[in-house]
Image (tube, rainbow, N blue to C red):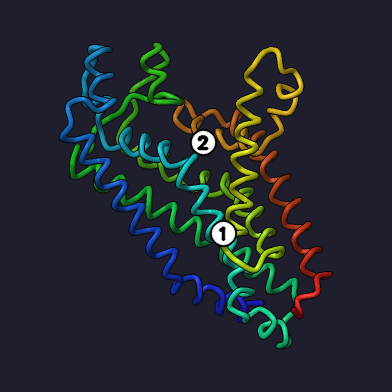
Amino acid sequence: MLKIFKHEMHKALHDRRTAWTVVGLSLFSFFLQLGFRFTGGNPLARMGRRLEIDPELLLNSINSTRLIMNATYYVILPVLAAMIFAGQFAGEKSSGTLWGILSRPVSRLSLYGAKFIVSSVTLLGVMLFFVGFTLIVGCVLFGTHDFLASPRIFDLMRGGGGGVLSFEEGVWRLFVSACLLSFLLLPTGMIAFWCGLFFKQTHTAMATALLVFFGCYVVQGLGDIDFLPLFQAIRPYLFTTAMESWIYVFYTETAWEEILPRAVVLLVYVVGLYIAGAIHLCYSDLGD
């Protein structure tokens, strides 16, 4: 198992697609931070003028990092998770190397477990780098200041602000958010992981997983409509609904009572998808 893990990790570290994705995320973060710093009409600056509060409590490295995380979470990061996980088996099948690997004295379950661990570690590493890079750029542009806590930044416009927290506390909470975000993205990745066993092309497995993700997101939105009781009943059990739990890290006091039940829902999804994929792999004919 350890030898397989080292081999898979070596391949992950030399994956150009992941490297270019990290570069793209870094550039996106950098230019968005520049926009926050030098554009007077940016949302944080407008909010500060409207609320007539100290602008540094809003326009700072912590809040700009949070805003960028929020901007990428439902668009870019699910694509990233799907790409990392989908390529594990679909990529091997498209290149014709999967059967060669399994022809060696390697069990299918060991290979499956190693690929899952490597994918999860890769996702966590990319998330930590992305959040850390964004924070560092924010510190250079805005300095290190206290920030006004709120579950969602734009809740401040509706009087939903909390207390003022220190920069050090903000750094810790961003680290917790990055780890939590990686976990919350696992169901999307696991769907892509399983789809990689059905399809021979990575982009097909990715597209299928993202179709499921955005489909669930649409159903989640329908659950907000009062005259659609069926969708209201389904909404709490969707993994996309549970994915929103990361925002509770930024209450004045972190709302673990809101985070943990949602994390349990996501854990059920991850375990269920993992078992389903493992069974599929064990009983699949991969000789073609």
Q: Quadrant of the N terminus?
A: bottom right
- 106 vs 249: above or below: below
Residue 53 falls in which quadrant of the image? top left
Q: Quadrant of the C terminus?
A: bottom right
The percent position of residue 183, horizontal first and vertical second, equals: 57, 48
Residue that sits furthest to the right in the current view: 283
Q: Is residue 248 left or right of residue 261?
A: left
Residue at the image position 60 percent from the left and 28 percent from the top = 258
Residue at the image position 69 percent from the left and 28 percent from the top = 236
The percent position of residue 268, horizontal first and vertical second, equals: 73, 45
Q: Name the residue that disc number 1 marks.
A: 120
Per the rendering, the mark at residue 246 is 2
Residue 278 falls in which quadrant of the image? bottom right
Are the residues tagged 2 and 1 within 8 Å (C-beta)? Answer: no
The percent position of residue 172, horizontal first and vertical second, equals: 40, 42
| Amino acid, disc 2 | Trp
Under circle 2, the secondary element is helix
Residue at the image position 64 percent from the left and 24 percent from the top = 222
| Amino acid, disc 1 | Ser
Q: Is residue 257 left or right of residue 42?
A: right
